[in-house]
């Protein structure tokens, strides 16, 4: 792979112990590939992680993150007790938006992949995936136009991952990724509007894009969504 760092180099660049770097890889926060018992991290991934907000509190688990995002999207999460729902609502009312966004980063595991260009549009239209990120930013209310080389971002349930990867001949990205799969648990319902991820989800994905324009636009958008929730 070109433009990669080994685990020791990436950890030094990020200022974290190697054991912490491996934890980031396991959680899906940091994409890496294992070759001959060694981890290699793309430089672009290290740069992206360097720009992420780092909250003081512990990240929310996926089981807490998605009900919070459902509430922000105007939905009522199912399967929660009244006290738990009240607790999540309090988090939305009292948390700083930037802090809140940073604590939602464990909502999915990221996979950087390559999809043959002839299959990208078909993949995006597959009902098993939920488009997000740059490609749907304008539709979600974030005034950003995606460049041609920006990877497509898609949410997908773990149960559908193997079949979708096989159907569309999706491969792990060795050099350049043209798609990002965000894998969620089988019981997770990604909030959607008109077939794409809801605005709070899109804003979070853009916050993690590593592009200064996307990060600033998404930060403003996410803060507005939190304020709008508090005004309901």
Image (cartoon, grey):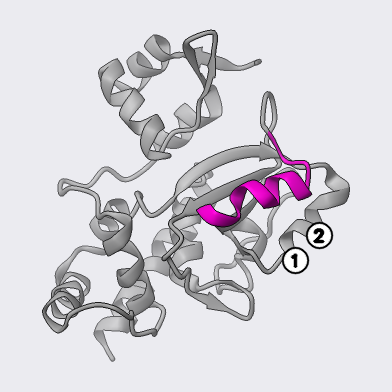
Quadrant of the rendered image containing residue 149: top right
Please give left or right for residue 16 compared with residue 56 in the image.
right
Please give left or right for residue 117 compared with residue 57 in the image.
right
- Residue 200 position, x and y percent, is 43, 69
Relative to the observer, which residue lies in front, 22 or 2? 22
Residue at the location (39% across, 85% down)? Answer: 74
Please give left or right for residue 155 compared with residue 103 in the image.
right
Task: Give above or below for 66 relative to 7.
Answer: below
Relative to the observer, which residue lies in front, 98 or 61? 61
Q: Magenta includes 57?
A: no
Q: What residue would you read off at disc 2?
A: 122
Residue at the location (82% across, 42% down)? Answer: 116
Relative to the observer, which residue lies in front, 13 or 124? 124
Q: What residue would you read off at disc 1?
A: 125
Q: Which residues are magenta?
A: 158-171
Residue at the location (51% across, 46% down)? Answer: 209
- Residue 3 position, x and y percent, is 61, 17
Toward the right, the furthest residue is 118
**Few, some or many residues within 10 Å of mark 2 (<14, 14–19, 20+):** few
Q: Magenta includes 163?
A: yes
- Residue 163 position, x and y percent, is 68, 51
Q: How many marks?
A: 2
Please say if the residues under marks 1 and 2 sit with CB atoms less than 8 Å apart.
yes
């Amino acid at each position: 792979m070109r433009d990669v760092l080994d685990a020791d180099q990436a950890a030094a660049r990020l200022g974290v112990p190697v054991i912490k770097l491996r934890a980031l890889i396991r959680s899906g926060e940091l994409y890496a590939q294992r070759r001959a018992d060694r981890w290699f991290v793309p430089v672009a991934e290290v740069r992206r992680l360097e720009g992420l907000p780092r909250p003081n509190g512990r990240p929310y688990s996926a089981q807490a993150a998605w009900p919070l995002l459902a509430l922000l999207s105007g939905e009522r999460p199912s399967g929660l007790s009244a006290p738990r729902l009240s607790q999540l609502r309090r988090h939305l009312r009292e948390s700083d938006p930037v802090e809140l966004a940073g604590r939602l980063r464990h909502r999915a595991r990221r996979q950087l992949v390559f999809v043959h260009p002839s299959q990208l549009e078909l993949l995006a239209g597959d009902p098993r995936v939920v488009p997000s990120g740059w490609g749907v930013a304008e539709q979600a209310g974030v005034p950003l136009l995606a460049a041609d080389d920006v990877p497509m971002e898609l949410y997908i349930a773990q149960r559908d991952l193997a079949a979708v990867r096989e159907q569309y001949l999706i491969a792990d990205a060795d050099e350049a990724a043209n798609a990002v799969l965000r894998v969620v648990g089988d019981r997770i319902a990604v909030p959607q509007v008109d077939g794409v991820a809801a605005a709070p989800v899109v804003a979070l994905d853009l916050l993690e894009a590593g592009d200064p324009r996307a990060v600033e636009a998404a930060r403003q958008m996410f803060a507005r969504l939190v304020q709008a929730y508090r005004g309901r």
